[in-house]
Image (cartoon, rainbow, N blue to C red):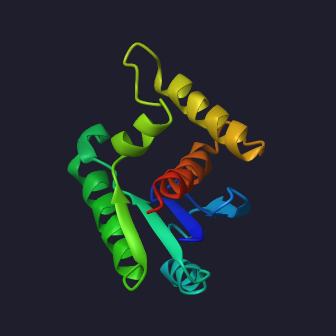
Amino acid sequence: MDYFLGIDPGRKGGMALIDEHRNLIYVEPMPFLGSGYDYERIAGMISHLPPRTGILLELKPGVMETSASPTSSLTFHCGVLYGLCLGQQTEVVSPKAWKTEFNLTRNYKESRHDMKLRTLKMAEHLFKKSLKTTEDGLAEALLLAEYGRRHRL
């Protein structure tokens, strides 16, 4: 693969495209249209990917949700994203897999905020890009793309 698209599917997630040399092509928040995901725009982005692009789609576990509704909504969204990626080289990656690569597994003594800050700092360090503390979804998309690049997925 020559390009790697990392997708953090969460509502505050994002999509990041890098090349085989870790050059950042783009990183942007998960597209929305009104209160829902903009699947037409996402489909357009995926259909216009450069040849030889590997897609890394994070599959979020539902254990962090407090009710079935957000879990089923996110599961549906991940399924739609996976469908939009059909025909492309796509790998579904667990958060544990890619976070282990960057030594970002959760230390349960630290707060979620501190864990997100570590994720942001790692992405900023690797990509020499400044991110706001609210852009942890973009940081995760970047790190997913980098995980794919490292493993040539």
Horizontal and vertical percent position of residue 17:
62, 65
Asked if residue 11 lies left or right of residue 129, the reply is: left
Position of residue 90 measured from the top left corner of the image (x, y, whole percent): 39, 71
The answer to whether residue 37 shows anywhere in this view is no
Image-based side of 63 in relation to 4, left or right: left
Q: Position of residue 91 (x, y in %)?
A: 37, 65
Above or below, 55 relative to 50: above
In this orientation, does residue 76 appear? yes
- Pick the residue in front: 34 or 2: 2
Residue at 26%, 47% (x, y): give it.
62
Q: Is residue 10 left or right of residue 108?
A: right
Q: Relative to residue 68, is residue 41 depicted above or below?
A: below
The one of 117 and 56 positioned closer to us in this rendering: 56
Residue found 37% across the figure and 18% down from its top = 108
Task: Look at the image and tell me in which quarter the C terminus lies.
Answer: bottom left
Total count of labels: 0
Q: Quadrant of residue 57?
A: bottom left
Give coordinates of residue 146: x percent, y percent. Answer: 56, 52
Residue ranking furthest to the left: 68
Above or below for 23 versus 125: below
Quarter-of-image position of residue 24 = bottom right
Please name the residue shown 57% across and 83% down the image.
Answer: 51
Residue 135 lies, with reference to residue 89, above or below; the image says: above
Between 66 and 64, the residue placed more toward the observer is 64
Identify the residue shown where x is 37% and y is 82%: 86
- Residue at the far top in the pictured view: 109
